[in-house]
Image (cartoon, rainbow, N blue to C red):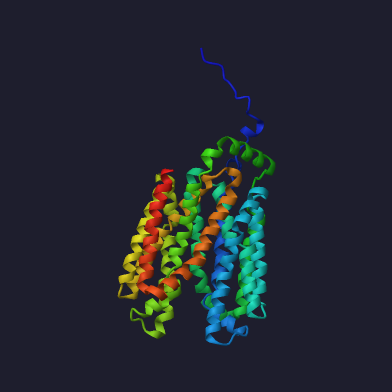
Amino acid sequence: MSQPTTFDMRETPETFALSYAQRNDRYWKRNLFICVFGSFTTLVSLSMLLPFLPLYVKQLGVESQADVIQWSGVAFGATFLGTAVTAPIWGRLADRYGRKPMLIRAAVGMAVVMSLIGIAHNVYELVGLRLIAGLVGGYASASTVMVGTQAPRERAGWALGLLSTGALAGNLVGPLIGGLLPGLIGIRGTFFAGAAVIAVAALLTIFVVKEDFQPDTDAKRGASVAASTHASRTRYAVIGALLATAMMVLLANMSIEPVITVYVGSLGVELDRLARIAGVVMACSAFGSMLTAARLGALADRIGAWNVIVGCLVATGLLMIPQAFVNQWWQLAALRALMGMSLAGLLPAIAKLARHAVDESKTGQMLGYLQSAQFSGQVLGPVIGGQIAVHLGLHSVFFATGSLLVGCAAFAQWARGR
């Protein structure tokens, strides 16, 4: 005779409530594609000013060449600094009020700020508005929170990889568009065009993105789960390894950016072709990442995220070394493309692990910290790479970054054991 079914008297109706991911299972694919489009358009708008930023700074009244270079760097980095500061805050608010409101806030905020940049009167307003764009924007960061929390566990790596592909494509296409549009509609008109495209993404987010968010139920469920699994779910060593690795990914990719034009020039490229060739070399890492991001994300779903993280860190670290020994620019471009292919597997796999490293009620905040770590690496990478190049030589940048990545792989392997 079968045994009677027993029930735990501590169970409550909230115990049987569907999780956030389960409730949004019917929406996550539609939301994913809107997030990919929105991330692409916002990052195109942010990166398209690269080719003409010095010209705009000069148009705003900065005269000396040294000051133009300095203010251009400050204006470009201000957005990433702002995003690094506010990403955890927006992630926490996403846990409290839902993911969709954060997407709307980012898209609308970016559209407004991009329009204001187009009517800036001086370089101080330009820097301030670029900083505000980072503080109130961050559509790609908000998309990572939504996709990372809605996608099923077994598809999270692929979904985050596809989202990463959209962001990488935006960073790749942006400078190309920025090199063409100013000649057609002017520099200020280019900002208005970018704002219009972001406005389209905002409208799609408002009317197409769907979310079933229940603050009271999710909060109670999160508190109940957190109370019973606090010791096993709060893995500080694992979280620290994930954040450090996320920062290293962008730091490694950006470390050579400040001096890449100088390095390409040292390979015998003629002066009249230098800027164009340097741009191609810079774009190769993003192009390589676009080819493999979704595939490596899906691989993380199959063989485990830790295996992908450790393998990609070692591969990327080793691919940094031969870049110091090239004697032709195309060799450097090919190695940068291969490096981008191995880098692409890291961010989706890290986000996949970060999602499950904390309780569901704090997933948005955790992914916000992850985004903050990435943008910190994007800010620190050029600074550290430039200092190493000045004091130890150009080739030392590759050796130092490669060694850091291999060391980070060892740290990740240690954290995996925890």
Q: Residue furthest toward the bottom? A: 63
Q: Residue furthest toward the top? A: 1
Q: Position of residue 284 (x, y in %)?
A: 41, 68
Examine the rendered structure and indicate whether residue 216 appears above or below residue 367.
Answer: above
| Residue 199 appears in the figure | no
Residue name at image x 62 percent, y 69 percent: 131
| Residue 164 appears in the figure | yes
Tag count:
0
Who is closer to the viewer here, 97 or 239? 239
Examine the rendered structure and indicate whether residue 222 appears above or below residue 49.
Answer: above
Rendered image quadrant of residue 21: top right
Q: Where is residue 345 in the image (x, y as percent from the top left)?
A: 43, 55
Q: Residue furthest toward the right? A: 216
User: For this view, does 258 lie left or right of residue 395?
Assistant: right
Residue name at image x 38 percent, y 67 percent: 336
Who is closer to the viewer here, 403 or 137? 403
